[in-house]
Amino acid sequence: MATTKQADRLEERFRLWDRNGNDVIERADFEREAEDIIGRLNAEGTPAAAELRRAYLGMFDHLAGAAGTDRMDRDQFLRVAEQEIISRGDAGFAAVVQPTIQAMVNVLDRDGDGEVSPEEMSLWLAAIGLEGDVADRAFRELDTDGSGKLSVGELVDAVRDYHLGRNEIPLLGR
């Protein structure tokens, strides 16, 4: 069962993913989210953008399949997100969230090293509406191995920790 903070984070996620404000999450909401991020990162028409789009839609398809509907209302989304992600811990985040994080890294990875630099992190956070000092602080906090780069694993852990209430860094937007 989700804690109050976890439930609040899932409520926030529902609100953000309900892009058209019709009180249900549909595939079109995830398409719009992916397209907006791709546009803000100037990645239109690239293979990495196509991968990000597929990852977002794959995340929706996973959740919608588990919910048994292609239009999740708030209660359905909260139930299925708790069941498929939160209660499964690392395995849930790896199965549902990691492909999207990997695809985001691939869009951002300007130098091709497979990791996110501070500059790339700033682009990411600006693309989801967070900028400046937030990006610098987030990078320092998330660079758990002190390498000066963020791996996909560190980023998935950060998204997990945010949704579990262990950090305050909303890498998937706020």
Image (cartoon, helix red, strand yellow):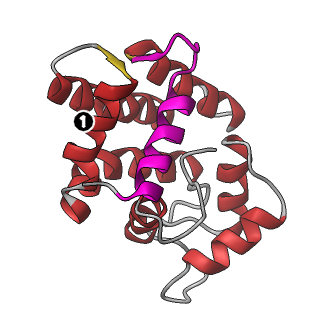
Q: Give the image quarter of residue 118.
A: bottom right
Residue name at image x 49 percent, y 61 percent: 162
Residue 14 within the magenta-colored segment of the rendering: yes
Residue 2 seen in the figure: yes
Residue 101 within the magenta-colored segment of the rendering: no
Instruction: Tell me the residue that label 1 is attached to.
Output: 80
The one nearer the camera, 13 or 59, is 13
Coordinates of residue 68 in the picture (x, y in percent): 15, 19
Q: What stretch is highlighted in magenta?
A: 3-25
Q: Is residue 157 left or right of residue 32?
A: left
Q: Is residue 21 above or below residue 142?
A: above
Circle 1 crowding by C-alpha within 10 Å: few under 14, some 14–19, many from 20: many
Helix, strand or loop for the magenta stretch, by majority? helix
Coordinates of residue 7 in the picture (x, y in percent): 41, 48
Residue name at image x 58 percent, y 55 percent: 170
Looking at the rendered image, the quarter that the N terminus falls into is: bottom left
The residue positioned farthest toward the front in the image shown: 4
Residue name at image x 56 percent, y 54 percent: 171
Q: Give the image quarter of residue 110.
A: bottom right
The residue positioned farthest toward the bottom in the image shown: 146
Coordinates of residue 67 in the picture (x, y in percent): 19, 25
The one nearer the camera, 2 or 155, is 2
Looking at the picture, which amino acid does disc 1 mark? Val
Q: Is residue 139 above or below residue 126?
A: below
